[in-house]
Image (spheres, rainbow, N blue to C red):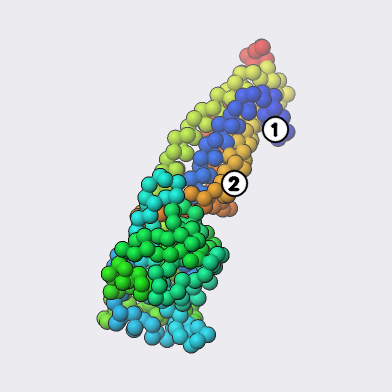
Amino acid sequence: MKIPLYYSYRNLFARRLTTGLTVLGIGLVVFVFCAVLMMGNGIKQAMVASGYDDNAIIIRKASQNEMSSYIVRDQAGVLESQMEAARGADGKPLVAGELYVVVSLEKRNGSGSVNVVVRGVKPVSLAIRPNIKLTAGRMFTEGLSEVIVGRQAADKFKGAELGGSLKFGQREWRVVGVFEADRSAFESEVWGDVNQMMAAFDRPVVSSMTMKLADPSKFSDLKKRLEGDPRLTVDVKREKEYYADQSYATSTFINILGMVISIIFSFGAVIGAMITMYASVANRSSEIGTLRALGFQRRSILSAFLIESVLLSLAGGLLGLVAASFLSFVTVSTTNWDTFSELAFGFALSTAIVGSALVFSVLMGFFGGFLPAVRAARMNIINALRAE
C-alpha cells in the first residue's frame, strides 16, 4: 500500500512555525545561489552581447585582448582590402581600425576613481555594430576632441553626462552624445575619433580591426588565409567568440566562489530541514504506528517522509527563486579581470539557473529528510503506538 501524496502535503501545514522558518532558511540559501549564478550569467551576457556572429575581430597574434594588441598601418591596409568584407552604401568596406586604452575616471558618487575603457573608433564602427543606438545628443565630429559615452558610463562618472567634459590623454573631451548597446559591455565605454585618440595617447597604431562579413559562412576561409599570411601575424576570431572569452575569467571566478559559499550555507539549511523532520517524526510516532498497523510498508513510510522533506525544501527554493528574480532590475559594476577596467552589468536569470536552483533545493530536502525518514520507517509498531 502506498501513502497518498496529500498526506505529505497536509503535514507541512501542521507545524507552521517550524515549517515557515525552515522554508525561509532554504529560501535564503537558494537566493544566494541564484544571485551568484545570475551575476556570472550577467557578466557573460554583457560581454557576449558586445559581439556579432557576422563580425570578425583581428588582433595581434598571441595577444589575449585588445589592450595588449597592436596592428600597424600597413597591416590595416591589407585587412581593409579583404574580399570577405561587407560593403556599405557608399561602396566602402565595413572595416574599422580601433584604438583600445584604459584611463582613470572619478565616480560620480565620490567613492574614488576606476579604470574605464576609451575606444577610438570610426563612424563605420556604428554600421558594423547595429546595437549601438544614440539616445541623446549626436555623433562626435571627426577631427575634434569630442566623445560619446555609453549609458552606464554617463550615469556613473563625473563629467560623463551629456554636455559635460572628461580629461584624459592630456586633453579635455566634450561629451556630445550618449548611446545604448543592449546592456552590453560597450555601455561602460567612452568612444571618440580614432585619429584624435591616437594623437592624444601618442599611439601610431590601432589595437584591433573589426570587419563585418558579407557572408559569415566564409569566416573559416578568411581566418585561415589571414593567420597564414606572413605579412600580418594576427589572430582572427568571431567577435562574439572573442567577447565570450573575455568574460571567462571573471564569470568563472564568481561562479566558483558563489558555489563554495552556497554549499557552505546549504549545510545549515540541510541541518534545519533535518531538525524539522526529526521533530515531525517524534511528534507523529502514534500516527506512524497506526500507519504500520494498517498495513503500510516501511518503504511507504520512508517515501512519505522523504516527499514531505523535498516538498518543504522545494517551497523554500521557489521562495528564493522568486526573490532572486527581482535582481534582474538591478545593475551593478565590477572589474573585468582581463582588462582591469570597469564593467557594468545586470543580473540575468535564465532557464538553466531556474533548473539548477530547483535541483539544488530538492537535493537539500532529500539529504535533510533522509535520516529522519529512515528513523520513521524503522520504528517498532508497538513502541510507536504507545508513544504519546
Q: From the top left corner, tell me how far across and down residue 227 is, in percent.
A: 32, 77
Seen in the picture, residue 342 relative to 202 is either above or below; the reply is above
Q: Quadrant of the N terminus?
A: top right
Name the residue furthest bottom.
Answer: 91
Q: From the top left corner, tell me how far across and down residue 235 is, in percent.
A: 33, 72
Picture quadrant where residue 372 is located = top right
Q: From the top left corner, tell me how far across and down residue 277 is, in percent.
A: 59, 25
Q: Nearer the viewer, residue 299 or 168?
A: 168
Q: From the top left corner, tell me how far across and down residue 91 is, in percent.
A: 48, 88
The kind of residue tagged 1 is Tyr
Can the viewer see residue 385 in this picture? yes
Q: Nearer the viewer, residue 380 or 39?
A: 39
Q: CA distance from mark 2 to mark 1?
A: 26 Å
Secondary structure found at label 1: helix
Q: Quadrant of the C terminus?
A: top right
Location of mark 1 (residue): 9
Picture quadrant where residue 280 is located = top right
Residue 325, numbered label: 2
The kind of residue tagged 2 is Ser
Secondary structure found at label 2: helix
Left or right: 168 in relation to 281? left
